[in-house]
Image (tube, helix red, strand yellow):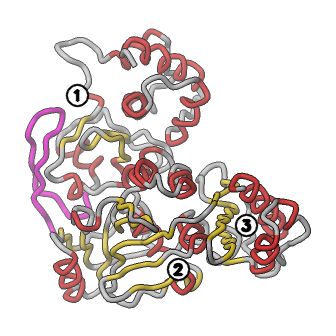
Amino acid sequence: MYNFNYHRAGSVDEAVALMAKASDGRFLAGGHSLLPTMKQRLAQPTDLIDIGRIAALNGVKTESNAVVVGAATPHAEVNASAKAIPALMALAAKIGDPHVRHRGTIGGSIANSDPAADYPAALVGLGATVKTNKRTIAADDFFKGLFETALSDGEMVVSVSFPKPEAAAYMKFPQPASRFALVGVFVARTSGGVRVAVTGAGPSVFRVKAMEDALKAKFTPDAIKGITVPAKGLNSDIHGSAEYRAHLVNVMARRAVAAAA
Amino acid sequence: MTIAVAMKVNGKAVSGQVEARTLLVQFLRENLRLTGTHVGCDTSQCGACVVHINGKAVKSCTTLAAQADGTEVTTIEGLARDGKLHPMQEAFREHHALQCGFCTPGMVMSAIDMLRRIPRPDEATIRHELEGNICRCTGYHNIVKAIQAAAKVMGG
């Protein structure tokens, strides 16, 4: 890992100001995506701005209709505290391993937009809203592609607000070594309809409209039995072909519906 | 850029001047000469580098020394008291929960953290909880037995 300038920010405003002064800065929360990337020299920032100890970014708040998670909240804390949305709690418990969950954060995960990360499925599946230091962004508009988000230069995730669903579940087929999702499907039934979000399968999280429509009419696993996604454009690697992932999308979606129903 | 870091390691105040990129495990091993914490994979997979920061298990190969500044760190060297092994260490010895021993410091630190969160885990839970620790000798069977035995001794 190349050396860099390290700054610890005491507040969101200070972090944003430090970032504005850096020539090629990155925010550091838990560092569980960023530090491995820097070790491999896939990223070489000049400055790291440590936001991990900003109190305002830490913690899970339960509101009447939503659960709001601070950007620097570790996965273990979401697993312990997001009781109002059990599917979100359960998803957090499936990320990495216990040690990773003590350090890795929701803000770091979504800002990285790894195609196989779990949180993007929860954000899109629940129709969450991302709050940054500048604006709010709907989850549907946040994830733009492979390691790409709607965040502009120097923009920082502050929190994520998850509306409470009527019923929801996340089912993941993990890659056995890394625990990342080979395919993960988050299904939620809300007052506004049904949402089906898929991670791991494509370059970025995506929704399956045909499944959502079928589930809106009838929320049972059988309702989507025949609905498949095309393999074209899906990820293909040594762990699974695009065709295999396409098949898993349907299997995981049906299991998620069964778990949520 | 170099920075000053200060923390408590195994109950003792320590400090140092390090490059910003210094990992916690490097600070422990190279600056403090606490070589009980091992570097296995250096890619957050194997868990040989697990230490406790403020009582929680973390991978010290994926944590900057700067991020541990001002915290309390416990390493494998900090477990024994007055020449007496920690009950988890004693259980590992009693049940021969090691073959080559390389993964052992991380296994012991992870196992203590596991029992902090889940005082009486069953066998399946222990195996699942150990997903962040790899034993290349594949000596998991006795490790699981040791953790079960330690859970009884530690009064969970």
Q: Residue at x 66, y 71 (%)?
A: A197
Can residue B16 be found in the magenta stretch? Answer: yes
Picture quarter containing residue B104?
top left
Secondary structure beneath dot 3 equals loop
Q: Residue furthest right?
A: A226
Q: Residue at x 51, y 53 (%)?
A: A89
Residue at the far top in the pictured view = B94
Q: Residues within 10 Å of mark 2 (few under 14, many from 20)?
A: many
- Residue segment shown in magenta: B1-22
Pointers 3 and 2 in contact (C-beta within 8 Å): no
Q: Tag 2's secondary structure?
A: helix
Badge 1 density bin: few <14, some 14–19, many ≥20, Cα 10 Å = some
Q: Are marks 1 and 3 on the same chain?
A: no
Residue topped by disc 2: A139
Location of mark 3 (residue): A237
Q: Main secondary structure of the magenta part?
A: strand
For badge 1, the amino acid type reads Gly
Q: Whole-percent x and y of residue A125?
A: 61, 70
Q: Amino acid at mark 3?
A: Asp
Q: Secondary structure at mark 1?
A: helix
The residue located at (48%, 56%) in the rendering is A84
Residue A241: horizontal and vertical position, in percent?
A: 80, 66
Q: Residues within 10 Å of mark 3 (few under 14, many from 20)?
A: few
Q: CA distance from mark 2 to mark 1?
A: 45 Å
